[in-house]
Image (spheres, grey):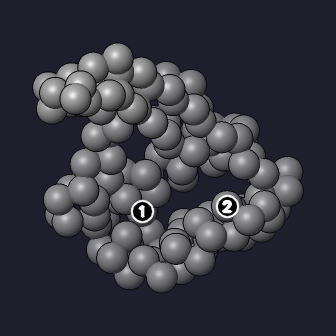
Amino acid sequence: MAPATCGGPEIDGLWTRFMAGFQQLADQRGLDLAYGRGLPGDLPAAGLQQVRSDAKVQFNPGGCPLSRVLALSILRMSDPLAGTGAVTAAELDRLVVLLADPSFVWMSQLMVVAWGRREG
């Protein structure tokens, strides 16, 4: 699997721990972060035809609007994230600093869109 950041092994490890904590929180709340990958199969099962789909990831430098939103989200979720045991509060603070640094680049999760037509 390719690294999710352009920051080297130490930063990739930090990002992996952050994402592990985020995944745990999502699981606790019933949020399926991988659901989009199933959309192309779910739409025909729901009766849609001519189903098409697309997926993309974004590479985001620190300081860009999406990085600022993520940093604010991390600050807001810091206690629950650290509470998972996957990542420490100090590591989350470091990640917030990195998200403001234009030389830090991170890759978004896979974003999937799918569409189709219902006859009639």
Q: Residue at x 53, y 80 (%)?
A: 75
Residue extending furthest top?
A: 50
Front-lying residue, 88 or 62 = 62
Front-lying residue, 10 or 108 = 108
The C terminus - image quarter: top left
Circle 1 — which element? loop
Mark 2: amino acid: Leu
Looking at the image, is 104 positioned above or below residue 34?
below
Front-lying residue, 10 or 30 = 30
Looking at the image, is 72 positioned above or below residue 56?
below
Residue 5: in sight, yes or no?
Answer: no
Q: Residue at x 43, y 52 (%)?
A: 19
Q: In the image, is 72 to the left or to the right of 88?
A: right
Mark 1: amino acid: Val
Query: How far from the left and from the top, in percent, is residue 6?
Result: 72, 38
Q: Residue at x 42, y 77 (%)?
A: 77
Q: Which residue is mark 2?
A: 66
Q: Which residue is mark 1?
A: 87
